[in-house]
Amino acid sequence: MGFKKIGTGKRLERNLRREHRVRPKNVPSEIAQMRMTAAKRMAHIDKYVIRIGKFDKSKPVKFFDVGCCPMLDGAPTTVVTKEAFKKAGYKMDVTAIDKFFPENFKPTDSSVRYKPMDISVSAPRGKFDLVRASNIFEYIKGAKNVERAKENIFNAVNEGGILIIDSLGKVLPEFGHKITNSAGSIVLKKVNGKMVFVNYIDTQSFYRSKRAGYV
């Protein structure tokens, strides 16, 4: 698939720690703990989105996951969302992208279309009922690149569709809610061609948890 190599083993954990600025305690595996914490956060958000989204069960929900974080051993958060929708009676058509993929990437779900893509450079084809951008704006440099990424993401959302902007504390206030030193998700809906703020979901408690192994 032409994934960009960012290393394996200890090198991968070192790169991942540097990229996400995570401060681990004494835990068996940093990647395993991040996988658990991220998945729990997404599952919490998924419940809310399924409830308010009012998606059409007569056809698959088209889901575009921007920043699927393949470094977390198979990009599990994408599949967590797919499984949550399945339990609620929905089918999903899933496309998941990230700027970097490890050289030994093995997808958690083979039915998901994983693609290396920089959303600040390229736009996806088609429209989606659900779009999630996970911790990407923190790492896009340059105002023009940020604006291009926002435009590409906004344009990818169907009329009436839901957009989730997930952040570890640096989401731009233009999205309707400024997050300061907290992990959370901003939920927006496309109404008459515009993204309208719906709610903010605080998920910082998942990172305060001793079980999660992060502070």
Image (cartoon, rainbow, N blue to C red):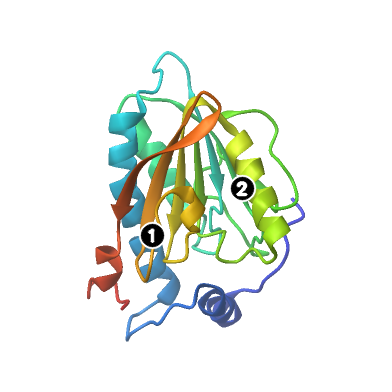
x, y (%) of residue 166? 44, 54
Tag 2 near tag 1, CB within 8 Å: no
Q: Quadrant of the C terminus?
A: bottom left
Q: Is residue 176 above or below residue 208?
A: above
x, y (%) of residue 35? 40, 63
Kind of residue at badge 2: Lys
- Asked whether 38 or 200 is in front, the reply is 200
- Quickly name the residue at label 1: 38
x, y (%) of residue 160? 46, 24
The residue mark sitting in front, 2 or 1, is 2
x, y (%) of residue 113? 61, 40
Q: In the image, what residue occupies the spot 70% across and 32% down?
A: 125
**In the structure shown, which secondary structural element does the residue marked by tag 1 occupy?**
helix
Outermost residue toward the bottom? 26
Question: Earlier along the polypeptide chain: callout 2 or callout 1?
Answer: 1
Label 2 crowd (10 A; few <14 / some 14-19 / many >=20)? some
Whether residue 150 is visible? yes
Q: In the image, what residue occupies the spot 56% across and 41% down?
A: 110
Q: Quadrant of residue 189?
A: top left
- Quickly name the residue at label 2: 150
Q: Quadrant of residue 199?
A: top left
Please state if 187 lies on the left or on the right of 143 as rendered: left
- Asked whether 36 or 161 is in front, the reply is 161
Please state if 168 lies on the left or on the right of 87 as rendered: right
